[in-house]
Image: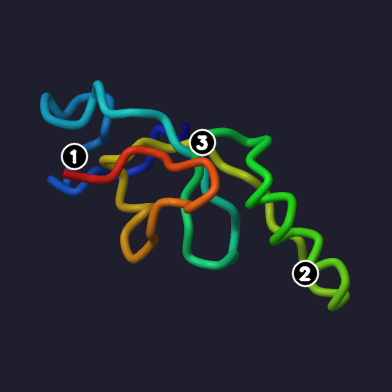
Amino acid sequence: MNLDDECIHGLPPYSCTMCKNSAAVFVTDGGWGKYHLTTDCPGIASGQGLVTARTGYVGNIHRTTVGSRKIDGRDPCLVCRPPRRS
C-alpha cells in the first residue's frame, strides 16, 4: 500500500481509526472501475486479456484498502466479491 494514500476521512488509512483495519483490496491502473479481493482474481486476468487484445496498456496492480480514496467510483468485482465500503 502506498503510504501517501488518503482514506475517505482525509487521513492516511494506517492512522485513521475507522480505516486502519479495513480489508486489503487491489486496483489496477485504468481498468473497468472495479476493485478486487486478490491479485489472481480471474476478473483482473480477463480484463487485462481484453486490453492486450486491443493492444492497449495493461496497468499495474496496486494494493490499497477499502477505506482508500483509490476505490472511489469503483464497484466490487462480481467474480472475487471483495467487501463493500460501508
Please state which amino acid type lies under the numbered disc 2: Val
Q: Distance between the residues labelled 1 and 2?
A: 34 Å
Q: Residue drawn at (41%, 30%), measured in percent from left and top? A: 24
Nearer-N-terminus badge (2/3): 2
Q: Where is residue 11 in the image (x, y as percent from the top left)?
A: 18, 39
Q: Where is residue 45 in the image (x, y as percent from the top left)?
A: 74, 50
Please state which amino acid type lies under the numbered disc 3: Arg
Q: Mark 3 points at which residue?
A: 63
Nearer-N-terminus badge (1/3): 1
In the displayed structure, does residue 23 sit left or right of residue 37?
A: left
Q: Name the residue under label 2.
A: 51
Q: Position of residue 18 (x, y in %)?
A: 12, 30
Q: Indicate the quadrant where residue 55 lies.
A: bottom right
Front position among marks 2 and 3: 2
* Front-most of residues 27 and 37: 37
Does residue 20 lie above or below 31 as drawn?
A: above
SS type, badge 3: strand
